[in-house]
């Protein structure tokens, strides 16, 4: 048990870690989950130890420990070993001797943006600064960043909060003449094939291109051959691994690869020669893949189509013959796939910012027929890539949901009036939920709850099922420009060699993926809070999005995706249509509050 002197500071740290049931509040402090420990780092010549805060014991820390310094306060997870001493695995640094803090000025005091605690800084004269000025505090030095009233500062805050500040540094790479040369000597020439890319209008990094040979009944999926430029172990490779993914903010991209590669030599732009790693799939008479091979090739994409343009061609029955034939195949494959997988209604909301980086509008992005065409081609290529691996490699896995969470969801839906009978398996039960939701016209809302009840997909070094897609084995092959996992897979397929530390790589990339998601959500929440602050006292249409102990609404108009805490919740049913009035919005804490003023 931790005494109350340290409670406020510790709770501030723990509340920013996305682990369920990490601690329990007690009358005299808090109690940490028994699977975790907190303590300070101790180093000797070749090992790293945890000096446990609670039980005063010492545990060896295993895993990635190079970034840990003597005296760092860290959270670790217990690794039970029945044949030896208990060891622990590093999870997250809570406080470091080299820690950089974001501090802002409020009423003459410097406040830690993350924990909201007061930070004493020697020789700081608040009189020469303005209220809500933001500073970066590192090694007893303050650096002025800007003012919190300025929305342009939000990127900086999100990146620093989630330790992604290195993405702000200059990131360039100059190709040499040898790299700029197209290698026909060691690659198959596929330049005569009519490849095309189908992407969003604004896309610059074209990962994939497709071509369907109607006569031979062969589908080619060409993927940017990033591994031919990013050599394993190079400085460029180390930086890409550190980033793991491209990060997409509303108004900019922080890429995994420098733009000279991601939007340049690697991008499968039309009418230029490009290195590609091609998945060639031979269909049988039922258009199922009977054989596949992976080819290092040179291609020349003939067209770059936007999704909207392809949708228009489909609607007007004006598709090019080859693409039209492929569309018919993918439609059949999608129908077959969904018998084992799921089709969740996923409307993505993209925030639109003005020149001052303030939120002004949103754009709904729904998957259309053209998206399904490309998606099915990519899913097939990803599956075929996974099949080339043995039991070890890099896989995208998604475990079946915990039956207890599904039972709890059934009970929750029952309160709303959705009576779902539990079926013989979880897949059939979820399908029954979706069917019942469609009768009430709340498919999208129920799909969100189903997704929340499931486990998060992750990368694994061991082959396992992908529950959501309904696949026995699956990996990521098709986006090496923006995902490091795909780059690892390309190298394995080419060399046949599995990295010795593949398990650690899978875990670190999965962790980075989660952190990047949290970072983007952090930024979006701050944008929503800034927007809501302008509309305090105004009324909007919404629905009850969360009826738990922390009830929330989600707007149905004007600014979709915005959620706010209800301060006068009176037991309204989940999904109920309500009119709300914003009562408070704080873009520092990202908290928005409202009250229900009626129904509609």
Image (cartoon, helix red, strand yellow):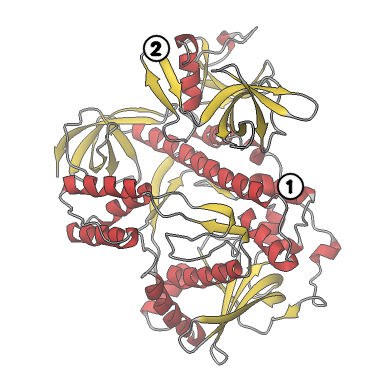
Q: Check disc 1 and report its element: helix, strand or loop.
A: helix
The residue at 47%/37% (across/down) is 522
Residue drawn at x 73%, y 66% is 496
Left of 266 or right of it: where is 410?
left
How many other residues sit within 10 Å of disc 2, few (<14), some (14-19) or many (≥20)?
few
Residue 364 x, y percent position in the rendering: 38, 55
Viewer-proximal residue among 211 and 51: 51
Q: Quadrant of residue 139?
A: top right
Work out whether mark 2 precedes mark 1 in sequence or the reverse, and give the earlier one.
Answer: 2
The residue under label 1 is 238
Q: CA distance from mark 2 to mark 1?
A: 46 Å
Numbered circle sitting on residue 68: none
Q: Nearer the viewer, residue 272 or 461?
A: 461
Any mark on residue 28, and which?
Answer: 2
**Residue 63 horizontal side relative to residue 119, left or right:** right
Q: Residues within 10 Å of mark 1 (few under 14, many from 20)?
A: some
Q: Is residue 340 above or below residue 354?
A: below
Relative vertical location of residue 353 with respect to residue 67 in this rendering, above or below: below
Q: Is residue 240 visible?
A: yes
Point out residue 23 in the picture as x, y percentages from the top left corner. Answer: 43, 26
Instruction: Residue at 61%, 62% (x, y): give it.
Output: 391
Q: Is residue 527 above or below residue 178?
A: above
Q: Identify the element where label 2 is drawn.
A: loop
Q: Position of residue 325 (x, y in %)?
A: 46, 85
Q: The C terminus appears in which quarter of the rendering?
A: top left
- Residue 172, can we see it? no
- Residue extending furthest front? 83
| Horizontal side of residue 173 vs 220, given as left or right | right
Report x, y in % for residue 262. 66, 58
Q: Count the marks.
A: 2
Which residue corresponds to the image point at 66% horizontal and 38% vertical from the top-left? 63
């Amino acid at each position: 048990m931790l005494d109350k002197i340290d409670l406020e500071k510790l709770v501030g740290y723990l509340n920013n870690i996305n682990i369920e049931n990490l601690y329990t509040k007690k009358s005299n402090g808090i109690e940490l989950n028994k699977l975790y420990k907190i303590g300070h780092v101790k180093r000797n010549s070749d090992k790293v130890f945890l000096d446990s805060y609670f039980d005063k014991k010492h545990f060896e820390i295993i895993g990635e420990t190079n970034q840990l310094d003597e005296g760092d306060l860290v959270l670790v997870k217990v690794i039970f070993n029945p044949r030896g001493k208990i060891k622990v695995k590093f999870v997250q640094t809570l406080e470091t001797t080299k820690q950089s803090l974001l501090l802002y000025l409020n009423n003459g005091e410097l406040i830690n943006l993350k924990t909201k605690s007061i930070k004493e800084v020697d020789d700081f004269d608040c009189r020469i600064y303005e209220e809500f000025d933001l500073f970066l505090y590192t090694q007893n030095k303050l650096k002025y960043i800007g003012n919190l009233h300025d929305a342009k500062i939000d990127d900086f805050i999100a990146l620093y909060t989630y330790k992604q500040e290195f993405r702000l540094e200059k990131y360039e790479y100059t190709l040499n003449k040898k790299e700029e040369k197209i290698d026909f000597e060691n690659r198959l020439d596929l330049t005569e094939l009519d490849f095309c890319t189908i992407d969003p209008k604004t896309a610059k990094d074209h990962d994939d291109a497709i071509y369907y040979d109607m006569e031979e009944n062969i589908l080619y999926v060409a993927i940017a051959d990033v591994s031919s430029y990013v050599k394993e172990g190079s400085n460029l490779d180390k930086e890409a691994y550190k980033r793991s993914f491209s990060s997409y903010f509303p108004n900019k991209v922080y890429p995994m690869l420098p733009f000279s590669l991601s939007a340049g030599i690697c991008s499968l732009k039309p009418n230029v020669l490009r290195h590609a790693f091609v998945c060639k799939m031979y269909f049988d008479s039922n258009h199922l893949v009977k054989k596949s091979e992976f080819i290092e090739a040179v291609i020349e994409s003939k067209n770059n189509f936007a999704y909207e343009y392809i949708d228009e061609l489909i609607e007007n029955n004006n598709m090019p013959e080859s693409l039209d034939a492929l569309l018919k195949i993918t439609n059949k494959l999608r129908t077959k796939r969904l018998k084992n997988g799921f089709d969740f209604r996923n409307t993505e909301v993209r925030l639109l910012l003005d020149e001052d980086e303030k939120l002004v509008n949103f754009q709904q992005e729904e998957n259309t027929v053209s998206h399904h065409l490309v998606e099915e081609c990519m899913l097939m290529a990803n599956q075929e890539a996974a099949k080339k691996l043995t039991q070890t490699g890099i896989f995208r896995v998604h475990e079946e949901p915990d039956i207890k969470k599904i039972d709890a969801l059934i009970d929750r839906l029952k309160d709303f009036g959705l009576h779902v009978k539990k079926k013989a398996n979880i897949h059939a039960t979820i399908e029954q939920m979706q069917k019942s939701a469609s009768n009430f016209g709340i498919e999208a809302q129920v799909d969100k709850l189903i997704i929340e009840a499931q486990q998060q997909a992750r990368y694994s070094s061991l082959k396992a099922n992908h529950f959501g897609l309904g696949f026995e084995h699956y990996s990521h092959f098709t986006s090496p420009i923006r995902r490091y996992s795909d780059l690892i897979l390309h190298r394995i397929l080419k060399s046949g060699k599995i990295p010795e530390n593949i398990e650690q790589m899978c875990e670190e990339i999965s962790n980075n993926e989660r952190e990047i998601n949290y970072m983007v959500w952090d930024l979006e929440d701050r944008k929503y809070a800034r927007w809501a602050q302008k509309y305090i006292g105004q009324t909007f249409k919404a629905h009850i999005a969360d009826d738990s102990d922390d009830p929330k609404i989600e707007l149905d108009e004007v600014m979709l995706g915005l959620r706010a805490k209800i301060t006068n919740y009176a037991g309204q049913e989940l999904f109920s249509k309500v009119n709300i009035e914003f009562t408070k919005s704080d873009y520092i804490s990202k908290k928005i509050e409202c009250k229900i003023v009626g129904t509609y």
